[in-house]
Image (tube, rainbow, N blue to C red):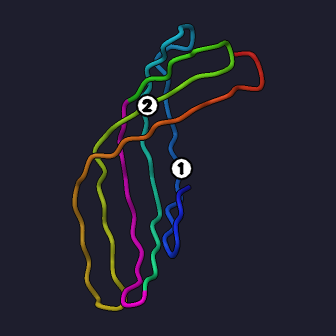
């Protein structure tokens, strides 16, 4: 989830790992997000869908860094002005993971 003053983005992102027996793991997935915003002159909501590919690198047995990237398909509707916008952009995610149990 992501949020800021008057902005909320929350979603799910199921992933598939091609291999689980390496220090560098390649994966793919599909992210689905709900977007909501409210400012002084506009408010609205929408969705974002992102197919992605990425890699996760283990620095220690239970600690890893990950990065993924993919096209983001956006669709947003402003309720105050009755305007709908859509488009495609590039999105990326960077993560730090700690695993509490052995892999």
Residue on which the image places disc 1: 12
Q: Quadrant of the N terminus?
A: bottom right
Q: Is mark 1 on a helix, strand or loop?
A: strand
Q: Is residue 44 above or below residue 102?
A: below
Q: In the displayed structure, would residue 70 be above or below residue 58? A: below
Find residue 100 and report its horizontal and vertical position in percent: 77, 26
What residue do we see at 31% from left, 50% from top? 72
Q: Residue at x 36, y 47 (%)?
A: 50
Viewer-closest of 47 and 93 = 93
Main secondary structure found in the magenta portion: strand
Which of labels 1 and 2 is toward the front? 2
Image position, residue 80 (x, y; %): 35, 91
Q: Earlier in the sequence, mark 1 or mark 2?
A: 1
Instruction: Assess whether residue 46 is covered by the magenta stretch.
Output: yes
Residue 13 lies left or right of residue 51; in this view the side is right
Q: Which residue lies furthest to the right in this view?
A: 101
Q: Is residue 35 left or right of residue 86?
A: right
Q: Give the range drawn in magenta.
A: 40-53
The image quadrant of residue 97 is top right
Distance Cα–Cα, label 1 vs label 2:
16 Å
Residue at the image position 56 percent from the left and 14 percent from the top: 20
Label 1 crowd (10 A; few <14 / some 14-19 / many >=20): few
Residue beneath disc 2: 67
- Where is 9 relative to 103, above or below? below
């Amino acid at each position: 989830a992501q949020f800021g003053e008057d902005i909320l983005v929350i979603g799910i992102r199921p992933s598939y790992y091609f291999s689980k027996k390496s220090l560098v793991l390649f994966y793919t997935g599909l992210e689905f997000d709900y977007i909501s915003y409210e400012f002084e002159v506009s408010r609205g909501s929408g969705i974002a869908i992102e197919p992605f590919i990425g890699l996760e690198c283990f620095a220690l047995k239970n600690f890893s860094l990950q990065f993924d990237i993919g096209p983001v398909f956006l669709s947003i509707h402003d309720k105050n002005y009755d305007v709908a916008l859509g488009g495609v952009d590039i999105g990326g995610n960077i993560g730090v993971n700690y695993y509490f149990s052995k892999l």
